Amino acid sequence: MTSIQEYMLPCLNKTLFGIDCTGCGAQRSVALLFQGEFSEAFFMYPAIYSLLILFLFLVFNLFFKFKYDYSIKIGLILLNAVIIAIAYIIKMIHIFN
């Protein structure tokens, strides 16, 4: 039986420069979610749940428009950017120490 991990794309940044990018771990994190490994998915890529909330909100917002939807989208995008940046900084500190 084939595993979903056999079809994952390699990180071009890591391949060329040997350093993780800000998205490294996202594919594996989604695979872990599908396998029911929820805490492992978070530790693999901490922004996975906030990205999932953003994605669900965007899909929901395609069908239902309401007041302040633009502000909510911007807030969720900024939240994700902050989580991704902080997780990346922490990962780089651990790699270089």
Image (tube, rainbow, N blue to C red):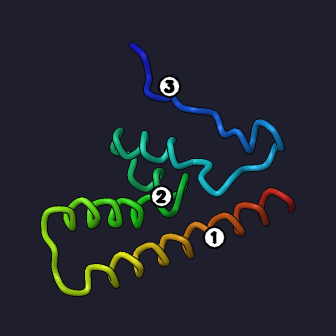
How far apart are the two marked residues, 1 and 3, measured between alpha carbons?
27 Å
Q: Nearer the viewer, residue 42 or 15?
A: 15
Q: Amino acid at mark 3?
A: Tyr
Mark positioned earlier in the residue sequence (1 or 3): 3
> Label 3, on which residue?
7
* Residue at image mark 2: 42
Residue 16 disc label: none
- Seen in the picture, residue 61 relative to 16 is either above or below; the reply is below
Q: CA separation, marks 3 and 2?
A: 21 Å
- Looking at the image, which residue is at 44% across and 27% down? 4
The image shows residue 40 at horizontal and vertical percentages of 48, 51
Category of crowding for the residue at label 1, using alpha-carbon neighbours closer than 10 angstroms: few (below 14), some (14–19), many (at least 20) = some
Give how far across and how far down residue 76 sits, in percent.
40, 75
The image quadrant where one finds the N terminus is top left
The residue that appears at 48% across and 47% down in the rendered structure is 29
Q: Amino acid at mark 2?
A: Phe
Give yes or no for contact between labels 3 and 2 (Cβ–Cβ under 8 Å).
no
